[in-house]
């Protein structure tokens, strides 16, 4: 029986399904019906549901130590910070509990950078159609008016320009004093799975160097192998000053991270920032276990191969579908843009195809399957999506 949500604040339009068990890319509901998961908790359970190695790490660490606070050294935090910095080309890490918190830390770094430069009214350059979170600062940085409504006035200090348009950035640089940083996603997931060109990210790096801005890249959804590399920015061969992570880092356990290098890595000092639960022994041991599995099983390379199979298969299957405007993606991050509002397809996919999908921007089906998905399951997603859109 489906539980009601009488005592829950109505912040979600929930589907009438409740899951009780998962394994890999599969889920089972309260009636024992099997579903194929093509969203992975919105790019979170990258290694699939109920991964035995992660379950063992959770159980072992829970029997040893859950929490001491950041007043003390935490060995698992040190290990995870060192490993993430090595993978990303960064120098220092701050651990928190979510992507929004990681982006808040990045934005506070931008403000400290501004104060060091003597900029009294700093501006962070952000992009149209972006999504960075729902806290007050990350909400203001987000480029979606729909999520702003009811929360105005928004926090000041953000200048918005079109995405993947380097000339717009140059124009803003010439017209606006006080810009101190750029915050950008390599792929706009919530914005319709729109992929920034490598040249765009490279030119952003050059402009940041020229003007003394921080290049801050939001890898909350794109990081941890989702695009076929450890981090989305690596496809462009650039070196950001700051990156933010969450989602797949804990495979379902809450953890976020803000990584920095160079002068940005030295901006925080004791008292500038903190988190009660951030970087706990449990969270960081899980993060280390995720890295162990990803490195041993070459998950990023597998995601690249499966992503190409998914993208090419969808393009072939849907090439004559008149309502499909575009199919785009990067690794296992795929969007199918339609010519009309299609949010109802989420419920239809559950009921008719036993498939979990999401719809973003109202008209784009977003597919974010677990990175451990196999070729047969990729082909199964293609078949189910094809039937969903043709019927």
Image (spheres, rainbow, N blue to C red):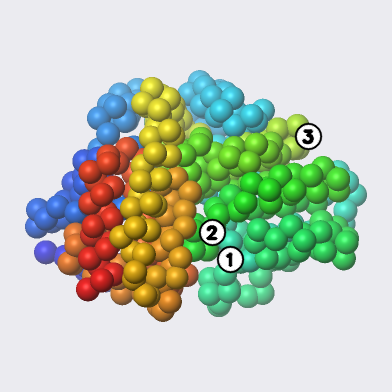
Label at residue 194: 2
- On the image, which quarter does residue 242 sit in? top right
Name which residue lies at 23% across and 51% down: 380
Q: Which secondary structure, mark 2? A: strand
Callout 1–callout 2 Cβ contact below 8 Å: yes
Q: Which secondary structure, mark 3? A: helix
Name which residue lies at 38% across and 58% down: 315
The C terminus appears in which quarter of the rendering? bottom left
- On the image, which quarter does residue 273 sit in? top right
Q: Earlier in the sequence, mark 1 or mark 3?
A: 1
Q: Residues within 10 Å of mark 2 (few under 14, many from 20)?
A: many
The answer to whether one can see residue 319 in this image is yes
Provide residue 119's location: percent of width, then percent of height: 88, 53
Taking depth in this image into account, of 239 and 13 the one nearest to the observer is: 239
The N terminus appears in which quarter of the rendering? bottom left
Q: CA distance from mark 1 to mark 2?
A: 9 Å
Label at residue 129: 1
Q: CA distance from mark 1 to mark 3?
A: 29 Å
- On the image, which quarter does residue 142 sit in? bottom right
Name which residue lies at 69% across and 36% down: 239
Q: CA distance from mark 3 to mark 2?
A: 31 Å
The answer to whether one can see residue 214 in this image is no
Is 250 situated above or below 141? above
Taking depth in this image into account, of 387 and 1 the one nearest to the observer is: 387
Q: Which secondary structure, mark 1? A: loop
Label at residue 263: 3
Q: Residues within 10 Å of mark 3 (few under 14, many from 20)?
A: few
Provide residue 67's location: percent of width, then percent of height: 44, 32
Callout 1–callout 3 Cβ contact below 8 Å: no
């Amino acid at each position: 029986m489906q539980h009601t949500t009488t005592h829950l604040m109505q912040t979600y339009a929930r589907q009438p399904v409740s899951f009780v068990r998962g394994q890999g890319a599969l889920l089972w509901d309260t009636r024992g019906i099997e579903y194929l998961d093509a969203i992975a908790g919105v790019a979170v359970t990258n290694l699939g549901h109920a991964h035995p190695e992660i379950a063992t790490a959770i159980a072992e660490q829970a029997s040893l130590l859950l929490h001491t606070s950041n007043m003390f050294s935490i060995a698992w935090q040190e290990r995870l910070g060192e490993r993430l910095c090595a993978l990303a080309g960064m120098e220092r890490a701050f651990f928190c509990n979510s992507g929004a918190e990681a982006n808040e830390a990045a934005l506070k770094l931008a403000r400290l950078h501004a104060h060091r430069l003597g900029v009294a009214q700093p501006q962070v350059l952000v992009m149209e159609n972006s999504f960075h979170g729902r806290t007050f600062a990350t909400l203001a940085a987000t480029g979606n008016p729909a999520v702003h409504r009811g929360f105005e006035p928004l926090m000041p200090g953000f200048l918005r320009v079109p995405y993947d348009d380097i000339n717009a950035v140059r124009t803003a640089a010439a017209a606006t004093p006080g810009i101190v940083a750029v915050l950008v996603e390599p792929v706009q997931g919530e914005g319709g799975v729109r992929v920034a060109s490598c040249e765009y990210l490279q030119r952003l790096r050059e402009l940041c160097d020229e003007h003394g801005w921080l290049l801050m890249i939001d890898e909350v959804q794109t990081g941890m192998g989702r695009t076929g590399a450890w981090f989305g920015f690596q496809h462009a061969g650039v070196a950001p000053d700051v990156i933010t992570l969450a989602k797949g880092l804990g495979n379902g356990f809450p953890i976020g991270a803000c990584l920095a290098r160079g002068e940005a890595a030295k901006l925080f000092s004791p008292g500038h920032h903190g988190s009660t639960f951030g970087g706990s022994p449990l969270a960081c041991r899980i993060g280390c276990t995720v890295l162990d599995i990803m490195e041993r099983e070459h998950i990023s390379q597998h995601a690249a191969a499966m992503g190409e199979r998914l993208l090419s298969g969808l393009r072939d299957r849907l090439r004559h579908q008149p309502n499909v405007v575009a199919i785009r993606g990067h690794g296992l991050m795929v969007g199918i843009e339609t010519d009309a509002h299609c949010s109802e397809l989420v419920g239809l996919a559950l009921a008719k195809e036993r498939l979990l999908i999401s719809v973003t921007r109202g008209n784009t089906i977003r597919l974010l399957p677990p990175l451990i998905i196999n070729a047969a399951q990729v082909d199964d997603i293609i078949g189910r999506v094809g039937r969903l859109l043709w019927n």
